[in-house]
Amino acid sequence: MSFVNGNAPVAYSLMTSGTGTSAQLWQVSSTGTSAGVTAGNFYLDSTDSDKLNGRKFNVTVGGWFKAHGATQTVAVGLQIFPWNTTVSGGRTASGTATFTPVASGTLIAGTYYDFLVSQDFFGEANANTLTCFAPTVYFAGSAVTIVTTASAQTVAFASSSQTEPINGVNATTDYALASFVPTFTNSVSDSTMTAQLTTCSITTI
């Protein structure tokens, strides 16, 4: 069984924001916003939290970068935004890196490079934590060795409930467990950099 973010495809289009040398959260593209996706961070939302209780799941994101800087390197990563304890509470305002990104080798200006990040997670409602497994990261077809993975992240599992007697449509109370956002970090500021997501999914294992 797998769960894929239904809003993802329309937000795959090019982005051109690489300004600065700190970790950049992937942004919804102009194509995505014109198609009705909320502008801002590209949130890959998990399914209902109770469906992930005691289950291992995988987050995978991938795509490509086109280098512009002559001495440019890039480090790809992933951040988690746990959801609060109610649907209206929504996700946390700031994310946490699920591992410490490692920079690529020096890129050649004008060249395209593919990347892929795949990371497993496991959470349990009694502990209300999410274990971050060591990720698999590839850049330009080569494995990137990740040394540091985040400690267990605090999350809030919902206990789905149904009022009795049931009146009309099931009215369970639930919310996503977490949202995930791919990141990239340039070694030199690049305001003309182009990049694209071509895959992003959350899949139970």
Image (cartoon, grey):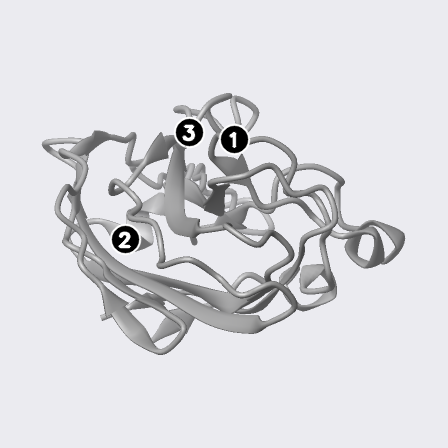
Indicate which label's residue lies in the foreground, 3 or 1. Answer: 3
Residue at the spot 29% in from the left edge and 37% down from the top edge: 159
Residue at the spot 72% in from the left edge and 42% down from the top edge: 191
Please tell me how crowded label 2 is: few (under 14), some (14-19), or many (20+) other residues with Cα within 10 Å. Answer: many
Looking at the picture, which amino acid does disc 2 mark?
A: Leu
Q: Nearer the viewer, residue 109 or 156?
A: 109
Residue 167, quarter of the rendered image? top right
Q: Earlier in the sequence, mark 3 or mark 1?
A: 1
Please tell me how crowded label 1 is: few (under 14), some (14-19), or many (20+) other residues with Cα within 10 Å. Answer: few
Q: Nearer the viewer, residue 178 or 184?
A: 184
Q: Which residue is mark 3?
A: 95
Residue 48 visible in the displayed image: no
Q: Which residue is mark 2?
A: 52
Q: Is residue 27 above or below residue 13?
A: above
Left or right: 132, with 65 as reference point = left
Q: Nearer the viewer, residue 21 or 51?
A: 21
Q: Which residue is mark 1?
A: 87
Left or right: 61, with 144 as reference point = right
Residue at the spot 53% in from the left edge and 69% down from the top edge: 63
